[in-house]
Amino acid sequence: MAVNQQSLISDDILDKEYVMDRKDRIIEECEELWKQMEKYQQEITLAEGERLNCSDAQLTLLMMRLKNLTAEYNQWLERTPDIIPLNPESLITLGKEELQKLHHNLEMLLSTVQSKNQQLQEDLRREQEWLNEQEELGASLNEMCKELKNQVIPVSEKRTFLEMKTKMTKIKKHKEKLLTSLGEILDKHFPLPEENGSKKRKRECQPNAQLITLHEILEILINALLHSPHDPYVKINDSFWPPYIELLLRTGIVLRHQDDPSQIRLEAFHQ
């Protein structure tokens, strides 16, 4: 019990010493401020007779500030410092208040940091997605570049060959279609002489001839023009029915040889 009383007495002594020391420091600071103000006031008083560089408004403002500082200094001299009791209950109360303020400030700071962190995470996610897309695009472009470097010449030759082959196939199909349509038209409108009721008369005129259709005559002329364009003439024989030859000559589809009228050729419409 005696020990506790001695500790309380020593604590009270320390508290009084701390308060007195703090009061002495405040008084010293106030006296220092007062000395400075007196010094400035003396300088202003000495400078009243001299010509001032500043305007009257600035001088008035400085005087007002001087009065305010003087009044504030007087208030500090008259004010008695609040002495905080240093008993355990007061210290605990003050500690709780400071901790609550600190807790509140830390909560606000935590909320701000979390919001900023969430925004940074969202930015990071978008940047990561963009980076992944760019990496995929770069990988695709590199792969395409390698393929083009390795296959630039073969692909060009192969493509040209395939294009020509496709065109040849289309031309052949178109040719076959035209020949088929031509054959159908000729067979329908220009049949063999035997099918027109003149079989007996034709046999009498050409007893040993095996007549061919107009379709076959044109096919012979077309093959001669395509296979031997330097000599496309075909000699007329007994299998060529004269009315068909006359029809082709009159329409300008075939031409006779200049030196040998028994030879004809197909007009080169494609030139």
Image: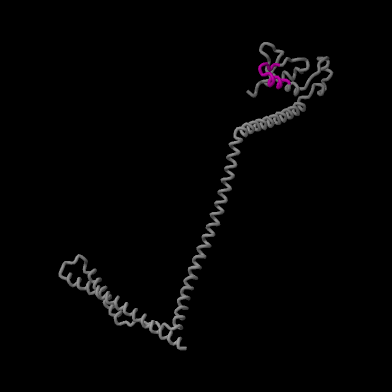
Residue 8, image quadrant: bottom left
* Membership of 259 in magenta stretch: no
The residue positioned farthest toward the right in the image shown? 200
Q: Can I make out residue 74 in this image?
A: yes
Across and down, in percent, residue 160 comes to 63, 31
Q: Can I make out residue 250 in this image?
A: no
- Compared with 127, 81 (above or below) is below
Say which residue appears at 22% left-offset and 74% top-offset. 38
**72 relative to 262 in the view: left or right:** left
**27 relative to 209 in the view: left or right:** left
Image coloring type: one colour
Across and down, in percent, residue 240 comes to 76, 18
Say which residue appears at 81% left-offset and 18% top-offset. 210
**42 relative to 227 in the view: left or right:** left
- Compared with 36, 141 (above or below) is above
Number of numbered discs overlaid on the protein picture? 0
Say which residue appears at 46% left-offset and 73% top-offset. 102
Across and down, in percent, residue 115 comes to 51, 64
**184 relative to 50 in the view: left or right:** right
Q: What stretch is highlighted in magenta?
A: 220-233
* Membership of 231 in magenta stretch: yes
Choose between 168 and 261: the one closer to the eye. 168
Across and down, in percent, residue 258 comes to 66, 12
Residue 51, image quadrant: bottom left
Choose between 181 and 228: the one closer to the eye. 228
The residue positioned farthest toward the left in the image shown? 49
The residue positioned farthest toward the bottom in the image shown? 1
